[in-house]
Amino acid sequence: MSIFGKKPQQPTDQPLLPGTAAPDQAGGSTKFPGIRLKESSLSRRTFLMRSLALVTGAIAASLAALGLGAITAPALRKDASQWSPIGRPGEPGPGEPDLATLNTPLLTSFTKLSHDAYMAARPEQIPVFVINEGDSKFTVFDVRCTHLGCPISWDGDGEKFNCPCHGAVFAPDGKVLAGPPPKPLNRYETKLEDGVLYAGQLQV
Amino acid sequence: MFAGSLEWVEERLGLRPVASRVLDHDVPQHITWWHCFGGLTFFTFIIMVATGIIMAFFYVPSPDHAHDSVAYLQNEVPFGAIVRNLHRWGAYTMVVLVVMHMMRVFVQGAYRKPREMNWIVGVVALLMVFGFGFTGYLLPWDQKAYWATNVGINIAGSVPFVGSFISAFLRGGPQLGALTLSRFFALHVFILPLLLIVLLSMHFGMVRKQGIAEPL
């Protein structure tokens, strides 16, 4: 005798396979004699196979959902909102840009704390074009061309922005004048507080 | 839309006999619940592979970033904590299940002729599972990981004659550090899985060839 199961029974000429009906089950339930079970088109074998497929599929789908959720989440993450000082228009400190000149794009940069996943937060220089439009109104353009991200430059004589990569030309208000870019230059949110100009989120 | 796709493939490749041979074979009548532990161990191995691959999207085997990247996965990534804990608890479960499997084979005497080779393959695979546990324990690179590995390597160092070489090899030098972490990572993620897959193929192939042992 064994706790691991019975010895195989006397071999019949037709071995009993899972799902095949034993001869004594044909006439009715052995537990409840007299009650005839309804004939079902679903055999035990098919039922077990489908159950197994269902459970396997559910486990695989759960794992796939966890994995896809985890690895797509970083793509949906937004930068935390933060305001970074650009300068004090009209009264620049040492090393700061003078933002007093009206209606002329000025290439400068601001320092933003960059949070790169598990890396320690570190300061990052973000180059921008700042235009003082007077009346305490400022436009801060991202320097990257909206075509493929090359840095644009300001052509003071022609009063336009040029991209070196594919010949794109932008107007001083950011509109596309020529070339392949699909949309105008991107801007940063701005605010003027206590005489300091701040850049916020990039408006894409 | 995809109705008939299966028939389309079947008409060209004729895979149905292969599938039924692999999945739909007869099982002897003396099978009991005790016979499930091998398959359950394999199931946990699949869970380990799946969750391990997900974690590989985030983990960095460098002393500077290992702990931070694990903490990031655990605290910031959606489902990161459940994926990591599935891997962790799955590892504990796998060790328990594989030992149960081995006990069944031992008590039942299923290792006897003609299945001696499958027993040996199984014992090597068991050692690999322990190797997975040992190498994986270091990867989070926290105090517990560091000192547990220190203890483990010192135990390996107590082997007569070659002990000091073994411990230096495991450490990748005289001190437990950057090279230890990267070689434990390589063992855990590349070497051991490949070897275990090969061994499991042999293990399962021999079971199919020789059948499941008769009870005592």
Image (cartoon, rainbow, N blue to C red):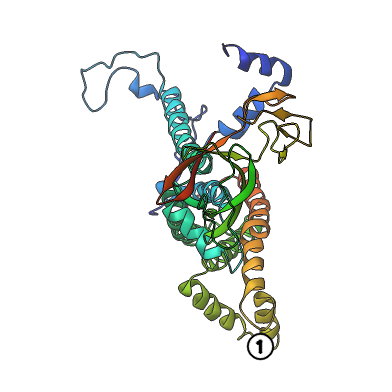
The residue depicted at 23 percent of the width and 28 percent of the height is A31
Amino acid type for the residue under numbered disc 1: Pro
User: Residue A94 at what x, y percent from top left?
Assistant: 57, 63
As drawn, A16 above or below B216: above
In the picture shown, does residue A82 fall above or below B100? above
Q: Nearer the viewer, residue A162 or B33?
A: A162
Give the residue displayed 60% in from the left and 51% down from the top.
Answer: A109
From the top left corner, tell me how far across and down residue A24 is, in percent.
Answer: 34, 23
| Position of A36 relative to A125 (above/below) | above
Q: Looking at the image, can residue B216 be seen?
A: no
Give the image quarter of residue B180. Answer: bottom right
A152 or B88, which lies in front? A152
Q: Nearer the viewer, residue B1 or B133?
A: B1
SS state under label 1: loop
Chain for numbered disc 1: B
**x, y percent for residue B69:** 53, 59
- Residue marked by disc 1: B160
Q: Is residue B209 left or right of A45 when viewed as pictured?
A: right
* Above/below status of A160 relative to A106: above
Q: Quadrant of the N terminus of chain B?
A: top right
Nearer the observer, B53 or A158: A158
Furthest-bottom residue in this view: B161
* Count of picture labels: 1
Q: Position of residue B9 (x, y in %)?
A: 68, 18
